[in-house]
Image (cartoon, helix red, strand yellow):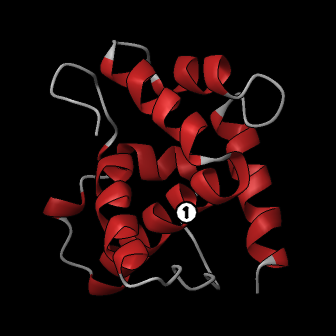
């Protein structure tokens, strides 16, 4: 989706993979009752975590955030976000470029996603 040149956060890479699995089954990731703050998710390397609950949260949240971006803001915008990452922008820069009026930062993305999570239950 993004290529090998860009710096893609692990949660986004894994979130795309998880979302594709859900999407293939014509399902959506279930709403989460708890989640990891995005700033913490950005730093996590799930491959080094032994806590099964935390791993489950990581993958569920990653898929849910990707689902939110694609469902609410559209596949074209998500593709644009991925291209920005592929071309070397940071995630913050790619968000600002792709979603200038809505989720233009990690903090805005987290706020909007949490609100959407509550509305989609």
Left-right relation of 74 to 14: right
User: Disc 1 designates what residue?
Assistant: 67
Dividing the picture into quadrants, the one containing residue 46 is bottom left
> For residue 51, which quarter of the picture?
bottom left
Q: In the picture shown, does residue 7 fall above or below 103?
A: above
Q: Residues within 10 Å of mark 1 (few under 14, many from 20)?
A: many
Residue lying at 42% horizontally and 73% vertically, measured from the top left: 23
- Image check: 64 left or right of 101? left
117 relative to 79, above or below: below
| Residue 24, image x, y percentages | 35, 76
Task: Decide: is 44 above or below 106.
Answer: below
Task: Identify the image quadrant of residue 95.
Answer: top right
Quarter of the image for the C terminus: give it.
Answer: bottom right
Secondary structure beneath label 1: helix
Which residue does the image show at 18% across and 76% down from the upper left? 50
Above or below, comparing residue 22 to residue 41 in the picture: below
Foreground pick, 73 / 41: 73
Q: Is residue 98 left or right of residue 57?
A: right
Residue under the point 28% across and 40% down: 1
Q: Tell me what residue is drawn at x 79 percent, y 52 percent.
A: 112
Q: Residue furthest top?
A: 88
């Amino acid at each position: 989706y993004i290529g090998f040149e860009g710096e893609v956060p692990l949660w986004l890479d894994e979130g795309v993979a998880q979302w594709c699995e859900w999407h293939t089954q014509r399902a959506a990731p279930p709403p989460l009752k708890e989640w990891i703050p995005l700033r913490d998710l950005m730093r996590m390397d799930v491959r080094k975590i032994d806590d099964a609950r935390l791993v489950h949260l990581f993958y569920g949240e990653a898929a849910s955030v990707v689902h939110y971006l694609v469902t609410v803001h559209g596949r074209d915008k998500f593709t644009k976000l991925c291209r920005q990452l592929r071309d070397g922008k940071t995630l913050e820069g790619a968000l600002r470029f792709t979603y200038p009026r809505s989720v233009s930062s990690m903090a805005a993305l987290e706020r909007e996603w949490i609100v959407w999570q509550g509305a989609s239950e």
